[in-house]
Amino acid sequence: MSRNRLAPELFINKAYSLFLSASPLKLALTIFIVLAGLVTGLQMATATASVTGMDVSTTKPSEAGTFQVEMISQLDPIKINTMHRWILKVSTPNGEPVTNAEIAVNGGMPMHNHGLPTAPRVTQELTTGEYLVEGMKFQMPGHWVVNFAINAGELEDTVTFNLEL
């Protein structure tokens, strides 16, 4: 029998021997720890599975296709608990910069059901179609969304960026 095949059998035999010789209290505690570990593992796997395949693009069309939007973080990579800025580039689908837009910012962690720890906002239009977003901060790792509601004259639309930190 090969060595790789023998090792699991020895492990199982040893575990079974320990199981038979354990006191009821030790046995109950061991079973509890194993079950708690399995539950935690399943919860983590479920959380990971729900964001697998998530679109983490930094450039994308708005929901109705009214705008093409790119977000650029001052920090690359984004760090937890660090205040930073973003630049938001907004253009029409054919590439013309969108000027004088009013942009609202919100977001949060959908799986934790809470918002951002700060109140980020667009503070100025830096150049034609480029807007400075100040007050960005994420206080924990995980899946975050940041939503922008863009109003430029008669044009209105929203865009959502997903982040996995």
Image (cartoon, rainbow, N blue to C red):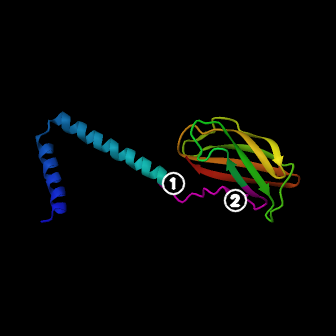
The secondary element bearing badge 2 is classed as strand
Q: Is residue 54 located in the magenta-colored stretch of the structure?
A: yes
Name which residue lies at 53% across and 45% down: 142
Magenta span of residues:
49-69
Q: Is residue 106 above or below residue 128?
A: above
Who comes first in sequence, dot 1 or dot 2? Answer: 1
Name which residue lies at 53% across and 42% down: 141
Q: Is residue 79 left or right of residue 158?
A: left
In the image, which disc is placed on residue 9?
none
Name which residue lies at 11% across and 40% down: 21
Main secondary structure along the magenta-highlighted residues: loop
Report the front residue among 90 and 75: 75
Picture quadrant where residue 64 is located: bottom right
Q: Is residue 91 located in the magenta-colored stretch of the structure?
A: no
Q: Is residue 60 above or below residue 80?
A: below
Residue 132 at what x, y percent from top left? 76, 44
Q: CA distance from mark 1 to mark 2?
A: 21 Å
Residue 37 at what x, y percent from top left? 33, 44
In the image, which disc is placed on residue 60?
2
Report the front residue among 114 and 55: 55
Mark 1, residue position? 50
Q: Is residue 87 above or below residue 25?
A: below
Residue 27 at what x, y percent from top left? 19, 39
Q: Circle 2: is it few (<14), some (14-19), or many (20+) Cα within 10 Å? A: some
Q: Is residue 128 above or below residue 94?
A: above
